[in-house]
Image: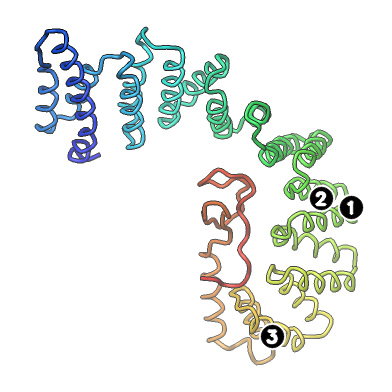
Amino acid sequence: MDVHDLVWLLLPVAAASGWWAARRSARRRASGQNEYNPVYFRGLNHLLNEEPDKAIDVFVEMLEVDSDTVETHLALGNLFRRRGEVERAIRIHQNLIARPALTSEQRAQALLELGQDYMRAGLYDRAENLFKELRQSRMHVPQALRNLLLIYQQERDWAACLETAGELQRQAGEDRSVEKAHYYCELAGAAERQGQHKQARSLLRKALSEDPRCVRATHLLARQAAARGDTEGALRLLCDSIEQNPDYLPEVLDEIVSAYRSQGQQERLRGFLRDTVARHPNQGAELHLVDVLRETEGDAAAIDYLNQYIARTPSLLGLMRLLELQCNTPGGENDSLLQQVRGQLRLLLQERAAYQCGKCGFEAKTLHWQCPSCHAWGTLKRRPLRETK
């Protein structure tokens, strides 16, 4: 932080210290004393001479902890933390906690603030200990649990996440079913990687019992079924996931098409794709239907369908597929212009963020079950094929 920025940051601190000094001076005058505090003017002198660290020490020294200044200390620490001056925030809150004059409520508030300072500094072990202390003291429990949940997610301790989310549900009445379902999915993934397939299935069923709309759990169960050779069971689960959340269709579409093809069910696949295009347009089924039309009716029918689709729904993916078909038709394979445009489109698609968080707007090229920006679960979805910007 630039020293001039810090000077402006310290002006409210100086004002708070001046107010406190004036209040104490007024009390002394009322009791017959007539003193002023030269320490305040020394702090101002450091501030004007652009010596912010010395000014901080002076002002904190002036703000002796008593019933009148606890809130000022807390506000000062919060101010520094918001501005990224975490070390200064920690020093202020530590100084506050060390004072024996605090009430239990004031100490609990200071512990909560210090824990958040430690989190901001990445000192998760220290923060966790403070939040556990608050939980045991039964003070500021919901805030402590929410912060513990953030820490456990950062550490990928999914069992602790489950326990803490359940406690939050009981203590604060918050619905944490969506997060708990994803925690079960994370645990199932770890079990699957260790070859514990039965345990993984049990955890995925628990995920669905927490959140019946958890498409992630259904998709993982479908992949398990496919790995066991149960193609029909996998296909049924994949179709169930579409009913759970149609926005998830693009994530399972390739696997559904592959399952139908592996069973040699071309007509059933064609019917599924036509039905899906009608019910969930612009989600990618159109491009798979182009492949089926090309196989059953030839290139001309596929190109005609694709031209009609692009006219209704402008799409880079649709245009890319059309150029591929055109380049593969007789006389088109040596068309250098088509090949050049096709290559440029491929680059554009590679650079395009395919996913976006419905909560904070974060964009990503790959699917994240937890948004890296706002940390919400299950909010990233694939953008539709139609270009909107």
Kindly identify the amino acid type of the residue bearing the numbered disc 2. Answer: Ala
Residue 137 vs residue 22, the one in the foreground:
22
Residue 252, given in percent of the width and then of the height, sits at 74, 58
Tell which circle, 2 or 3, labels the residue nearer the N-terminal end.
Answer: 2
Q: Residue at x 31, y 28 (%)?
A: 76
Residue at image mark 3 = 308
Looking at the picture, the colour scheme in use is: rainbow
Q: Residue at x 23, y 33 (%)?
A: 12
What is the quadrant of the N terminus in the image?
A: top left
Residue 127 makes an appearance in the image: yes
Mark 3: few/some/many CA within 10 Å (<14, 14-19, 20+): few
Contact, mark 2 vs mark 1 (Cβ under 8 Å): yes
Residue 383 falls left or right of residue 22: right
Q: Which image quadrant is residue 151 in?
A: top right
Kindly identify the amino acid type of the residue bearing the numbered disc 3. Answer: Gln
Tell which circle, 2 or 1, labels the residue nearer the N-terminal end.
Answer: 2
**Figure check: 293 above or below 116:** below
In this figure, what is the number of numbered marks?
Answer: 3
Residue 351, given in percent of the width and then of the height, sits at 51, 64
Q: Residue at x 9, y 27 (%)?
A: 45
Residue at image mark 2 = 222
- The tag on residue 233 is 1
Residue 180, given in percent of the width and then of the height, sits at 69, 36
Separation (CA) of disc 1 from disc 3: 35 Å
> What kind of element bears circle 1?
helix
Kindly identify the amino acid type of the residue bearing the numbered disc 1. Answer: Gly
